[in-house]
Amino acid sequence: MKALAARRRHRLAPVILMALALLFTGVVYAAIAPSAAQADTASADDLTEGERLFITNCSTCHGLDAEGTPEAPSLIGVGAASVHFQIVTGRMPMDANSPQAEAKPPQLDEEQAQQVAAYIASLGPGPSIPSAEQVDPTLGDAAAGGALFRTNCAMCHNAVGAGGALTEGKYAPALYESTPTEIYEAMLTGPQSMPVFNDATLTEEDKRDVIAYLIEQREPNPGGLSLGSLGPVSEGLWVFVVGMGVLICAAVWIGSRSS
Amino acid sequence: MSEEHNELTEPATAESFENPGLGHHRPRLGDDDPRAAKRSERQVVALFTVSILATIGGIVGYFAFPVAEPDAGNVRMSTLVLGLGLGLGMLGIGAAAVHWAKSLMNDHEKVEERHEQRGDDATRERAVEMLQEGAADSGIARRPVLKGALGTALALAPLSFVVPLVGNLGADWNVSKFRHTAWAGTPDGGPRYLATDPTDRRIKASDITRGSMVHVMPYRLPEEEHYLEEKAKAVVIVIRVDPSILKEPEERRGWSYDGIVAYSKVCTHVGCPVALYEQQTHHVLCPCHQSTFDITDQAKVVFGPAKRPLPQLPIAVDDEGYLYAQQDFDEPVGPSYWERER
């Protein structure tokens, strides 16, 4: 302890402290990071339980009858798919009124999400939760999905689904961790800033192709280190900092005198 | 001669410094201590060994990870192992050579004076003489036709690459093409329907629900000639908003249909595809330079370097409910160019 105290003013102390703090944050985040939820087929008709959960978790903002308040929109007619998406990705219940509802560890489990979704769906018709077959990536055509994704989605979500920035703190999230059901529901319902891609403009088969393409992107990249697939920013940073740094070190070593 | 030269090139203050000469030669550890020299030798050998092992490893990896099978992981491993083998193989040789030269070869400082760049007068005179002799021998002064032929041939020879180079800069100087897009009508004179990009399905007004966005191209365009050039000009985004929030001037009132508006997808700044639509703010962003357009207010620029609103495509609905273009854009799409206003 004494040795530690004596060295606390060492010039490398802040660097070491920062490294330790970063490591600690990383470990803690990895431990509590959200795990992907698995969707089952909609079966719940337990509307009473759904209503009870709605009143406990959602009604503060959306109103007791789900008709909306000045803070939050009406949920009548949004459909089960929208409710399920927002709950299983942890976006709802929202924990703060920020530019965008952040994905976080889900507050309700899959069964409860299905119950709330069934309750909201009973208030007015809307898109329903897709079946397992509708979102099965093995039934989709990844090549066709790639063409659709590049035209319809890539400008916000990046060509391989790495995500990207929008305005004023809003952003399009990365899609690497999203389940096929979540991807389908997001296209169908257009959560928050995202526009709606309904079944007429992007058919059910098209949506499954897009899912197949996105799942394909999770395979190992034959090109090696993708550096986040972010394009010139991360690649340029790598070349300037690491590549040129190594070259400078080599030049200094070659020019230095041998001891 | 050389004195005069020195006066011209060296600054006047040069005389105020004395040539410090070479510093005291400091011997390296290995110069006196045979054990240190032996250690350096072992390091050089180790570096060469790294190179040898890396090369062998690369060759082994080539056979261990065949790329014949369609397996992305295998391709990556093969590339990685071969690259490391080649890279470390070369790096080991290079590092060993540098370390060898630095630690074991002699390091006595040597001075080599820079030689005079100017030749001596006799050489220069002889050179001029030779040129004159050559000119006299060729008889170029006496034979004007020969001189003309040589000059013409030399002048024309570069044309065989200059003309195609300039010609290929732009085979087509017809700038008025920018004013027309495929939305003007089909080749047989009918109206042009709106279709989904890239699936080329016609779109009904009822297909576009509020809050949705469709990437649109002219229907059946892929069947026509120069389809990609035409598509590049004609891409359109179609968005449906609440009709009550649309701000439309009187003359454009008939250009939208029940809150459905169609705007060119080509940014008016430098032509990137403007397609990041924020459903809640009704803003469309350009991914290149963040120009932002307000879809509810004639796609006017609300932020960024773009100077003009996105051109609007006037749309209408036929008897069956399909959307079609009433007419072409009323202005050229995309970035500005010199002849745009003419």
Image (cartoon, coloured by chain):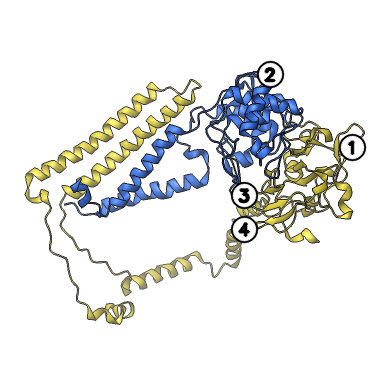
Chain colours: A blue, B yellow
Name the residue tied to disc 4: B156
Whether residue A147 appears in this view of the structure is: no
Q: Residue at x 31, y 79 (%)?
A: B11
The N terminus of chain B - image quarter: bottom left
Q: Nearer the viewer, mark 4 or mark 1?
A: 1
> Earlier along the polypeptide chain: callout 4 or callout 1?
4
Residue B75 % position (x, y)? 46, 27
Question: Could you give the CA–CA distance between mark 1 and mark 2, rounded to whole angstroms?
Answer: 56 Å
Check the residue under mark 3 and report the chain it is in: A
Asked whether the residues under marks 3 and 1 belong to the same chain, the reply is no
Question: Could you give the CA–CA distance between mark 3 and mark 2, rounded to whole angstroms?
Answer: 40 Å
In depth, the one of B201 and A39 nearer the eye is A39
Q: Residue at x 68, y 47 (%)?
A: B274
Name the residue tied to disc 1: B188
Asked whether the residues under marks 4 and 1 belong to the same chain, the reply is yes
Asked whether the residues under marks 2 and 4 belong to the same chain, the reply is no
The amino acid at mark 4 is Leu
The amino acid at mark 2 is Asp
Check the residue under mark 4 and report the chain it is in: B
Residue B225 % position (x, y)? 77, 37
Label 2 secondary element = loop
Question: Could you give the CA–CA distance between mark 3 and mark 1, rounded to whole angstroms?
Answer: 44 Å
Question: Could you give the CA–CA distance between mark 2 and mark 4, rounded to whole angstroms?
Answer: 88 Å
Label 1 secondary element = loop
Q: Which mark is residue A45?
A: 2
Name the residue tied to disc 3: A167
Q: Is residue B109 above or below residue A245?
A: below
In depth, the one of B131 and A134 nearer the eye is A134
The C terminus of chain B - image quarter: bottom right
